[in-house]
């Protein structure tokens, strides 16, 4: 009996480990050929702002553009990736108080990436070429994760991701923690932990998978879709 119980537990553990090791499957069929542009209003202790994201899919893959504008802060991000969410390259430019500029460029190869960040006006340059053995999520792809993964209560994913603040690879987790309504739209409540900390995404259950609201408890900021 003890032998049978041990074999049963071992078998179940093996199934669990194997299932966890399977790569995540991404659904990008809903991404249109003409750019989908979503505009958000962001409110927080450090001031209000606007956030706009554009996404489209063509023969060469998926393209995403983001603009974040708030008092004394502007951030522009662009990225290209294959239709199965493998990143190809990305760019990010951050301007603080119209003076400090952080310009980051990232290029992905089969098993390594090259990332360069230039900080102006100090003429400081940081470079790194980390290698990887499993797929990497680029910082430009983070807003797409919750929209392309299979969401259901209890679903959880772990990825290797790029932290552009340190030019290193770190873990990124996505977890569905519940369901609810945001702006009268039925949503999944999804926790995303990346280099910027915890963000709570309210993702539409409908076919467009829109992000209706994003809550960032650490910075006390809430971002709402403008309908």
Image: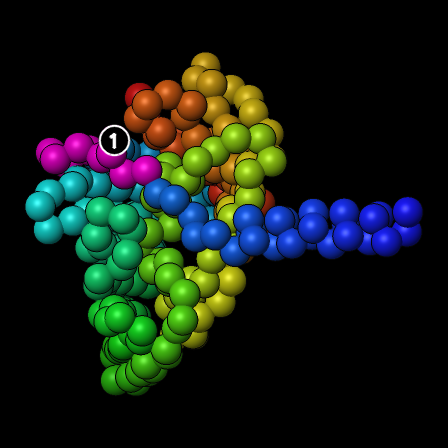
Residue 193 vs residue 96: left or right? right
Q: Residue at x 60, y 36 (%)?
A: 154
Q: Is residue 35 magenta?
A: yes
Q: Quadrant of residue 120?
A: bottom left
Count the marks: how many? 1
Looking at the picture, tell me which residue is in the foreground, 65 or 170: 170
Kindly give the residue lying farthest to the top in the view shown.
184
Q: Residue at x 32, y 38 (%)?
A: 27
Magenta range is 27-36
Looking at the picture, tell me which residue is in the foreground, 173 or 47: 173
Q: Residue at x 34, y 60 (%)?
A: 138
Quarter containing the C terminus? top left
Q: Position of residue 196 (x, y in %)?
A: 48, 57
Residue 175 visible in this rendered orientation of the protein:
yes
Few, some or many residues within 10 Å of mark 1 (<14, 14–19, 20+): few
Looking at the picture, tell me which residue is in the foreground, 146 or 65: 146
Principal secondary structure, stretch drawn in magenta: loop
Identify residue for label 1. Answer: 30
Q: Residue at x 47, y 18 (%)?
A: 186
Kindly give the residue lying farthest to the right in the view shown.
1
């Amino acid at each position: 009996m003890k032998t049978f119980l041990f074999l049963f537990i071992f078998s179940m553990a093996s199934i669990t480990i194997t299932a966890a090791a399977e790569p995540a499957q991404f659904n990008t069929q809903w991404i249109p050929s003409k750019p989908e542009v979503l505009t958000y209003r962001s409110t927080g202790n450090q001031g209000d702002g606007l956030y706009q994201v554009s996404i489209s899919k063509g023969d060469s893959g998926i393209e995403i553009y983001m603009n974040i504008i708030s008092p004394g802060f502007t951030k522009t991000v662009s990225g290209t990736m294959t239709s199965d969410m493998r990143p190809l390259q990305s760019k990010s430019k951050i301007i603080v108080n119209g003076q400090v500029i952080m310009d980051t460029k990232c290029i992905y190869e089969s098993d390594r990436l090259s990332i360069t960040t230039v900080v102006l006006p100090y003429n400081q340059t940081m470079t790194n070429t980390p290698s990887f053995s499993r797929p990497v999520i680029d910082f430009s792809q983070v807003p797409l994760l919750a929209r392309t993964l299979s969401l259901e209560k209890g679903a959880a994913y772990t990825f290797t991701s790029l932290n552009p603040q340190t030019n290193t690879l770190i873990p990124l987790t996505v977890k569905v923690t519940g369901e609810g309504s945001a702006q009268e739209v039925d949503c999944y409540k999804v926790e995303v932990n990346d280099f910027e900390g915890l963000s709570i995404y309210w993702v539409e259950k409908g076919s467009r998978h829109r992000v209706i609201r994003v809550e960032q408890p650490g910075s006390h900021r809430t971002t709402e879709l403008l309908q």
